[in-house]
Image (tube, rainbow, N blue to C red):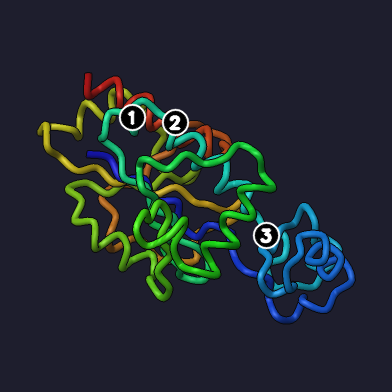
Amino acid sequence: MLTLVLAEAEVERMPAELSNHPAVIAHARQRGKPPRQILLDSNYHHAAMTKLSEGRRRGRPDITHLFLLTALESIVNKQGYLKILVHTRNDDCIMVDPKTRIMRNYERFLGLLEQLFENHVVPDKKQPLLTLTEGMSLLQIIEQQHADYTILLSKDGTVVHLPEFFKKIHTKEDQHLLCIIGGFPSGQFHTDLSAIITETISLYTEMLPVWTVASEILVNYGNMCR
């Protein structure tokens, strides 16, 4: 079993201090929603984010979009070996049903997440493909998974050859591996994970996009399970 946690993902509703900015008001009007119900997105709200705390890091739901497309369409997921969780900067936890098919159109994806933040479940409680729980720290989420081996992916970790690394640590067929990938464009984790992770690794000597890291993990894990 493999669990992927996209950690500290930069997905959040519009902060109150930006809700009256002209760029935000114009975009909210275009989406037909109140400003506080749309997601912060640097693609559209860059002008409003210049003085926002950590403004260069925030407003990146596109990273989560590409991560989910990569993970949900993977062979590992189709074979039933994958669990996907998204933890946001504001300690929301999004549980993703493996049967979910995320739309490739980014605007429609934004609408889906806006609906999720409003109702906490989409499409509904009878068919909960995405479920949002508030107030769950990254440490709480990881601890609840009871993984046998918890791996943090970081450019500052030990560079490994992933096929050999997985072969070394995956000693039992029912072993549960959990991999943590940062859901932000740059910088460090806000959460101190040193007490809970088993090992910190890097896949390459340079920074890689989130979806590249996810795809490398998924392909190599899938090859190991065959």
- Marks 2,1: beta carbons within 8 A: yes
Q: Is residue 152 above or below residue 207?
A: below
Q: Nearer the viewer, mark 3 or mark 2?
A: 2
Label 2, on which residue? 73
Q: Secondary structure at mark 3?
A: loop
Q: CA distance from mark 3 to mark 2?
A: 24 Å
Number of residues whose C-alpha sits closer than 10 Å to that of mark 2, classed few (under 14), some (14–19) or many (20 or more):
some
Label 1, on which residue? 78
Label 3, on which residue? 59
Question: Which residue is farthest front?
Answer: 126
Q: Quadrant of the C terminus?
A: top left
Q: Is residue 205 above or below residue 91?
A: above
Which amino acid lies under the numbered mark 2 shown in the image of this protein?
Answer: Glu
Which amino acid lies under the numbered mark 3 shown in the image of this protein?
Answer: Gly
Q: CA distance from mark 2 to mark 1?
A: 7 Å
| Residue at x 50% of width, y 66% of height | 190
Report x, y in % for residue 141.
32, 63
Q: Secondary structure at mark 1?
A: helix
Tell me which numbered mark, 2 or 1, is placed earlier along the sequence. 2
Report x, y in % for residue 66.
57, 40
Number of residues whose C-alpha sits closer than 10 Å to that of mark 1, classed few (under 14), some (14–19) or many (20 or more):
few
| Residue at x 30% of width, y 59% of height | 142
Q: In this orientation, which residue lies closer to the viewer: 156 or 8?
A: 8
Q: In this orientation, which residue lies closer to the viewer: 203 or 218?
A: 218
Which amino acid lies under the numbered mark 1 shown in the image of this protein?
Answer: Lys
| Residue at x 44% of width, y 62% of height | 121
Q: Is residue 74 above or below residue 87?
A: above
Q: Is residue 10 above or below residue 178?
A: below
